[in-house]
Image (cartoon, rainbow, N blue to C red):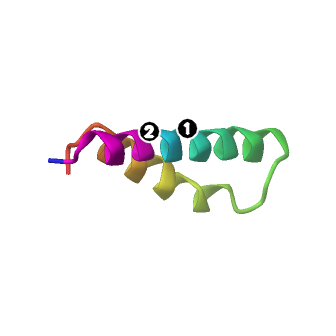
Amino acid sequence: MANGSSKFLYWILFLASTAAFILAIATRFEYLTLILPFVCTFFVKALDII
């Protein structure tokens, strides 16, 4: 179980990686799929599933 401060950090990292993913879609970034593991991992860790 993650404590409150690490969950907050994971939420911030999730939001930042999601923003980077949306920016990559908007700018048609060639390596778009390289951002997806970060989005998924930080979301799962923020929800404290793993």
Numbered range of the magenta stretch: 2-10
Number of other residues with Cα within 10 Å of mark 1, as a class: few under 14, some 14 to 19, many 20 or more: some
Q: Which residue is mark 1?
A: 15
Vertical arrangement, residue 47 with respect to residue 17, above or below: above
Q: Which residue is mark 2?
A: 11
Query: Residue 48, percent across and down?
Result: 23, 42
Prevalent SS, magenta region: helix
Closest to the observer, 50 or 25: 50
Task: Give the distance between the C-alpha atoms of the residues marked 2 and 1, in whole angstroms.
Answer: 6 Å
Instruction: Give me the residue at 85% from left, 45% from top.
Output: 27
Local SS, label 2: helix
Q: Is residue 10 above or below residue 31?
A: above
Picture coordinates of residue 36, whole percent (x, y): 53, 52
Camera-nearest residue between 15 and 40: 15
- Estimate the x, y position of residue 49 in percent, counting from the top left: 20, 44
Whether residue 44 sits left or right of residue 27 in the image: it is: left
Residue at the image point whose x is 34% and y is 48% from the top:
6
The residue type indicated by label 2 comes to: Trp
Q: Residue at x 44, y 39 (%)?
A: 11
The answer to whether mark 2 and mark 1 are in CB contact below 8 A is yes
Q: Amino acid at mark 1?
A: Leu
Q: Residue, x 70% and y 62% (percent of image)?
A: 31
Judge from the rendering whether residue 23 lies leftward or rightward of residue 43; answer left or right.
Answer: right
Say if the magenta span includes residue 6: yes
Between residue 21 and residue 2, name the one nearer to us.
2
Question: Which quadrant of the figure has residue 30?
Answer: bottom right
| Residue at the far right in the pictured view | 27
Residue closest to the eye, 37 or 14: 14
Please, which residue is most extreme toward the front here?
A: 5
Q: Residues within 10 Å of mark 2 (few under 14, many from 20)?
A: some
